[in-house]
Image: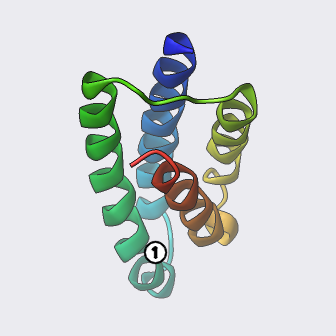
Amino acid sequence: MTENIDTLISAAEQAYQQALVTYQSASIDQKIATKPKLDQAAELIVTLRTKQLQGAITVSDQDVAAMQDLRTKVNDAATLQTALSSMVALILKFV
């Protein structure tokens, strides 16, 4: 299960990086709507890394698959806010 948490964190970081790229090309209205979730996702990834160091996190294969699916959804500005909300919700399961 240790490799699942590593994979989940890696996918979350990649999704966040892609979200930043998508955010940069979004309209001003989309940026205003998306910024709070983008910031929350960044904070939660840091918290998740800290929890990983403390141990005792169990991540299922479904959790990893869900995060990897979210990586593709943040590519589209139209689904960025929804994808970020889903990403935040998934990370919150572990922090």
Quarter placement of the N terminus = top right
Which residue appears at 46% of the width and 26% of the height? 10
The residue wearing badge 1 is 34
Q: Position of residue 52 (x, y in %)?
A: 33, 27
Which residue appears at 42% of the width and 83% of the height? 28
Q: Position of residue 64 (x, y in %)?
A: 65, 31
Question: SS for tag 1?
Answer: helix
Q: Say what amino acid the circle numbered 1 marks.
A: Thr
| Residue at the extreme bottom of the image, as rendered | 29
Q: Position of residue 27 (x, y in %)?
A: 49, 78
Q: Nearer the viewer, residue 75 or 40?
A: 40
Q: Nearer the viewer, residue 70 or 95?
A: 95
Which residue appears at 31% of the width and 64% of the height? 39
Q: From what the image shows, is residue 65 above or below residue 77?
A: above
The answer to whether 62 appears left or right of 23 in the picture is right
Classify residue 23 by image quadrant: bottom left
Q: Position of residue 4 (x, y in %)?
A: 57, 19
Classify residue 43 by image quadrant: bottom left
